[in-house]
Image (tube, helix red, strand yellow):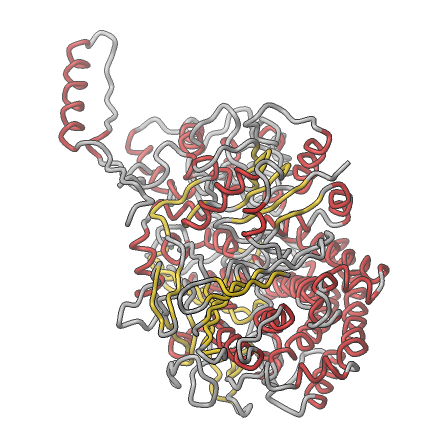
Amino acid sequence: MLQQLGVEKERYRIEWVSAAEGDKFAQLVNEITNEVKKIGPFNKEDAKKEA
Amino acid sequence: MAKPKVAFYWCASCGGCEEAIVDLAEGVLKVVEAVDIVFWPVALDIKRKDVEAMPDGSIAVTFINGAIRTSEQEEMVHMLRKKSGLVVAFGSCSHIGGIPALANLTDKASIFKKAYSTTVTTVNPEMTYPQESFKVKEGTLTLPKFYDHVYALDEVIDVDYYLPGCTVPTDLILNAVTAILEGKLPPKGTVLSPNKSLCETCPRNDSKPEKLKITKIYRPWEIMIDPEKCFLEQGLICIGPATRTGCNERCISANMPCRGCMGPTDQVTDQGAKFLSAFASLLDVTDEKEIQKIMEQVADPAGTFYRFSLSHSILKGKVK
Amino acid sequence: MAKRITIDPITRLEGHGKIEIFLDDKGNVENAYLQVPELRGFEQFCIGRPAEELARITPRICGVCPTAHHMASTKALDDLFKVDPPPAAKKIRELFYNIFMLEDHTLHFYFLGGPDFVVGPTAPAAERNILGVLAKVGLEIGGKVIKMRRECRELMTMMAGKVIHPVFGLPGGVSKGVKKEDAEKIQTVAKAGVEFAQFSLKVFEDIVLKNKDYLKLIVGDIYMNKTYSMGMVDNNNHVNYYDGLVRVVDTNGKEFVKFKPRDYAKVVAEHVEPWSYIKFLYLKEVGWKGFVDGQESGVYRVAPMARLNAADGMSTPLAQAEYEKLFKTLGGKPVQLTLATHWARLIEALNAAEVMLKLSQDPEITSDKFRTIPTATPEEGIGIVEAPRGTLFHHYKTDKNGMITDCNLIVATQNNSAVMNMGIQKAAKALIKDGNVNEGILNLIELTYRAYDPCHACGTHSLPGNYPIEVNIYDATKTLVKTIKK
């Protein structure tokens, strides 16, 4: 569904992290933050301007 | 006392909402006696200029159906907003985008290319496309601009009430009109249909097991559909859990599952996401491979879970 | 001094439209254009959808004739999945479809196109609406019209869940059968329908045909175009709305081609103009020669009069008698008189009522065998029906999983879009001379497109009797010279 909506794979993940795995969690969050930053924001142009 | 003035207008629409009003049949005569219809392009020969000339706020209620697809539609609804005391978004398209909003999964360029070039029977080697302004021998002809996105009405103007459905059920229309005429309206922004999900009023609810467990998904053409059992229990996608009731389960009574035209209940922002989460909770699988297998059986999740509601979803369509 | 007349919006039809009329220096009409300012993009956004869902998505093309789309789509799905529905399913679908034809046609006559005739095209605008019709035919009849429409629509709701956007069509059959008590209800309404259609034809005869002025208008040259005619026919070359082959006759009434749905793309093609969002259909073999009449022009017409031209007769006895009467009165086949389509429409309504009665009495209609599950791999499917407004084509291509990869939709009124332009040009040229324009003349021009029953009908509410169209006449310096208001 997300693919149909144009959301790139790099923007989401499913991971299993327990409350005791603090380091793992921090690492994951940093990783995905960097990946999303690399892709940049959704390119939402003004649809009413010249298409 | 002068009768309140009422107007009807249509944007990117199919005309079904106009028919819904006509389907009040004998009931509409009572309505007509009580109001003065001052603008209804499909039926009356009143022109845009005449509405422009009306004093601001002089129309008591304007019912607008259809989604916003072109510049002309946007201009008209802005104008009608100025002239009207209340504006009611009538039908799925103006409420949440409707079927025309499925175009938000594609774009203007693709639509034009398909319609005017690549469809099987179109013969257009010169690649002539409709133009907003075109000089013919005698003068210049104009067409409204086709936007790259389909908007629900409240994305463009301030909307007072919503009448949901594709098209709006007759009794909801009558209730709304009565409430307006009697001045007994709920708070601004209310969707004028009960705030419950379809499952609560569905006639198949009683036969539903305590806990639904789905192990396989079928397409409607693949199986004989049991006319008594819950569709989800039969493995057929039914958007009932994420859809507002009030339609009298018309599709269910024809032995076909719900596709969500009434939009979500008040508590839900994004109908498609809501359905996805409700659906996921019904799956009787824990193994990741099994989950993958079932999800692959779901054909066109975005176009099915958001069949009518793309304009009101969080992403509003395919992000560019 | 060049002048320009704009009629915006055109009214009492489904959809948006405007007419631009250009005058030359002498004040005679140089050209006229009927522009359609809307597009939604179904052919593109249906791609990626599951094929069977198109039977629920495509009806949203039109809320007046959603049944036509639902049926064309369902038949395209049969073809796509290579599945033959059981006989009961076909009968149920055809019964449903004829109820729809009866309802839609009689509604149009009384509420939309009818006023131009029953009351008169040059009658005061204030009377040219349903109220004027009621004044002419009486309130009792008016009540019958509303009741007929409501009862037909209740039957459709009973059969297919919703009357606006039905849902019961599936590849291989329908989702719901017809119970014995439902069949009996349908029979009762069908009998009333036959009587009502006959009565409507009598109304047309008394009020229209026996009126010399109206008759002159119908048989005159202003509302005449020489085109090919297209319509669906059964094995006996009788008009059929639900199924059959599509037949085209030429400007002399001779059969030009008869084709299977599979071959439609060899016969018709679509032309694009930069000044309208609608496309213009034409016969491929003859070619697009522009907005011109004649045997050498690929322009063709659909809908009631064209269907009667393209067929050899009607499938039911009462309608057949009326069919023969029409052609006898109007000088034989083919009838190229645009306004005659109002008469043909009522003959079709009678035919639909007779078919509705016959099918609802058929013992197989209550069978519980109304679905066959498809087993073949889907690939490509084409479904054609006759919508009230003309031949409707649905063409789908899918992948192995039945997901739409391509979609082509030719919607009834599109077949007439070229001749509608031509009709307006001709009427405008004939009626506007030396710069003389008044509201009566504008009315007569609008008569042309309304005859084609552009999709929508208004209903049972009272019209205020105002006909506020404003015509602005500008000279070459764009200075406002004159304003005519209704």
Tell me what residue is drawn at x 60 percent, y 79 percent. Answer: C338
In depth, the one of B182 and B319 nearer the eye is: B182
Q: Quadrant of the N terminus of chain B?
A: top right
> Residue B219 appears at what percent x and percent y?
45, 47
The image quarter containing residue B280 is: top left
Residue B87 horizontal side relative to residue C201, left or right:
left
In depth, the one of B199 and B89 nearer the eye is: B89
Q: Quadrant of the C terminus of chain B?
A: top left
Camera sees residue C91: yes
> Residue C297 appears at what percent x and percent y?
43, 85
Tell me what residue is drawn at x 56 percent, y 53 percent. Answer: B15
The image quarter containing residue A13 is: top left
Is B181 placed above or below C396 here?
A: above
Is B121 placed above or below C290 here?
A: above
Is B136 placed above or below C126 here?
A: below
Residue C140 horizontal side relative to residue C233, left or right:
right
> Residue B114 appears at what percent x and percent y?
33, 60
Tell me what residue is drawn at x 34 percent, y 45 percent. Answer: A48
Is C396 placed above or below C348 here?
A: above
Camera sees residue C95: no
The image quarter containing residue C101 is: bottom right
Numbered circles on residues, count: 0
In depth, the one of C100 and C293 nearer the eye is: C293
> Residue C276 appears at what percent x and percent y?
41, 65
Residue C130 horizontal side relative to residue A18, left or right:
right
